[in-house]
Image (cartoon, helix red, strand yellow):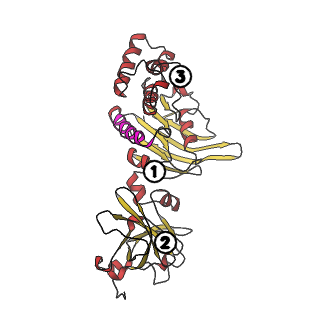
Amino acid sequence: MHIEVRGLNKKFGDFQAVTDVNFEIEKGQLIGLLGPSGGGKTSILRMLAGLETVDDGDIVFHGKRVNELPPQERGIGFVFQNYALFKHMTVEENIAFGLEVKKWTKPKIQERVAELVELTGLKGFEKRYPHQLSGGQRQRVAFARALAPEPQLLLLDEPFAAIDAKIRHELRSWLREMIDRLGITSIFVTHDQDEAIEVADQIMIINKGRLEQKGTPWEIYKNPQSPFVAGFIGESTIVEDVSSLRGFGGTGELSGTKALIRPEYVEIGKASDFELLSATEKGTVRHIHFRGSEWLVEVEIGATKLVTYRSLEKEILQPGNEVRVLIHRAYLFNDTDSWVMENRLKEDPMPVHI
């Protein structure tokens, strides 16, 4: 299903939940709605589903405006955060419920249920009740029930929020594979960056009811279009005046300009580790945190605190160690503009006194 949303607005009393949201989604894509809690993600999802009315704007499915269509006529499957399974029904009865409402024939229902049980990895659990299943299995039943009527659009509201971390990671991979196999257009709400980056074809960043940016995970991470997006995606540090950092000042035009600096923009080590020592400055390690595959190091340059990653293969640093710090680039922004800037001294080295 191809989706187009034009000028979408929604108020709850005096609260403006969604403001002038516009986007298009191509058939077969898996889209992540990502943003902080209360930002408007679920409101957008519920309007697409027909569970909330639209105050202003148009929702268009395959060229047809569907604002007034009831949920059951929109060709949508909806997976809720809390599963919403019927406790008194078995797995197969839960999956079959929507088909019975639509008055499918019994043989066709049995065939569809068997197909979905196989697809979702629930074979052998057909006669069990929800309380006899794990969290991951219950979520698979919820997926199967949403897919049973063969919807053209699958909507998922925080589908993995109630599941522990290990099972959540397994279900992400399973969902991605299932969507690829079915080719169904899908939109899922999440506030988990890793989840959106790992699963989605494209991400839409929603903040305070507005669409901040839409693009692939890599595009959004590499080229954020607003300070909010830059600060929300990935780990980062805000520096109030970038001109205080070596390689980003000296001419005066950046005085007072703020900078967002990601850990991968920062390199630390001994003086002998750097070919362009002139682009580095002195720093002091303050804290180190083991992250499983790497160290997260907090370092200070004067009054400026930065974080960076360090390989486990390199010498282990300790709090208090003096290091050289090279900031490769920074995301700069002021009241009117934002841009990425490389360290000038990497291209135009100058003498340095250690």
Q: Is residue 48 left or right of residue 165?
A: right
- Find the magenta span and give its range: 161-180
User: Can the viewer see residue 348 in this picture?
Assistant: no
Q: Which residue is mark 2?
A: 305
Query: Looking at the image, which residue is at 43% across and 47% down?
Result: 196
Q: Magenta stretch: residue 168 in it?
A: yes
Q: Amino acid at mark 1?
A: Gln
Q: Which residue is mark 1?
A: 193
Q: Amino acid at mark 2?
A: Lys
- Relative depth, front residue between 74 and 328: 328
Q: Residues within 10 Å of mark 3 (few under 14, many from 20)?
A: few
Q: Is residue 6 left or right of residue 265?
A: right
Q: Secondary structure at mark 1?
A: helix
Residue 131: image location, x then y, percent? 49, 25
Q: Quadrant of residue 175?
A: top left
State the CA–CA distance, disc 2 to disc 3.
Answer: 52 Å
Task: State which quarter of the image contains the C terminus.
Answer: bottom left
- Relative depth, front residue between 120 and 184: 120
Residue 104: image location, x then y, percent? 45, 14
